[in-house]
Amino acid sequence: MDIRRKYALNIETWVENHGDTLYHFALTRVRKKDIAEDLVQETFLSAVRSQTRFKGLSSEKTWLFSIMKHKVLELFFQCLSRLPKRTADVFVYREIDGLDTAEICKRLGISASNCWTMLYRAKSRLRQSMGILGFSR
């Protein structure tokens, strides 16, 4: 049996079967309807482009939601990339990698007070940037 036939996606029913759920998922992460709609469209477009890589290890719905989550994260990392590099590094080390202040200071050669200042600025700028993009808090 051809594996592609076994795990064939039913693209024609995506909007009907998953559109509303994906839209509500996106809308809970962003405050703007137009951005949520764009995220759903980008999700479907990405899914169409990558459909040959779907292996059937999850349901079609789970696969689509995984794509949507990556789309939302792309908007976050766009905001993060707008920060000065060292400020972004402090944020990533602390909030994503879970490093403590001493380790961050050692890696970057900064003082603890400088670390906290940079972390505060990173969070403030990310909130502002993500707010402009429509993310909810």
Image (cartoon, rainbow, N blue to C red):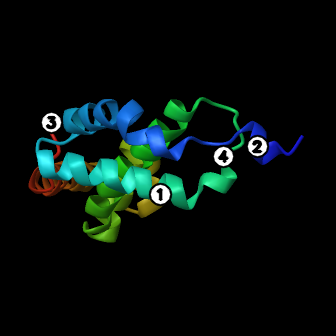
Q: Amino acid at mark 4?
A: Phe
- Which numbered disc flags the more N-terminal residue, 2 or 3? 2
Q: Is residue 97 visible?
A: no
Query: Which residue is disc 3 drawn over?
Result: 137
Q: Amino acid at mark 1?
A: Ser
Quadrant of the image containing the C terminus = top left
**Pick the front one: 51 or 10:** 10
Q: Secondary structure at mark 1?
A: helix
Q: Secondary structure at mark 3?
A: loop
- Which numbered disc flags the more N-terminal residue, 2 or 4? 2
Picture residue at 21% right of the left edge, 32% below the top: 28
Query: Which residue is disc 4 drawn over?
Result: 54
Query: Which residue is disc 2 drawn over?
Result: 5
Query: Which residue is disc 1 drawn over?
Result: 46
- Depth-wise, is mark 2 or mark 3 nearer the camera? 2
Picture residue at 69% right of the left edge, 36% below the top: 56
Q: CA distance from mark 2 to mark 3?
A: 43 Å
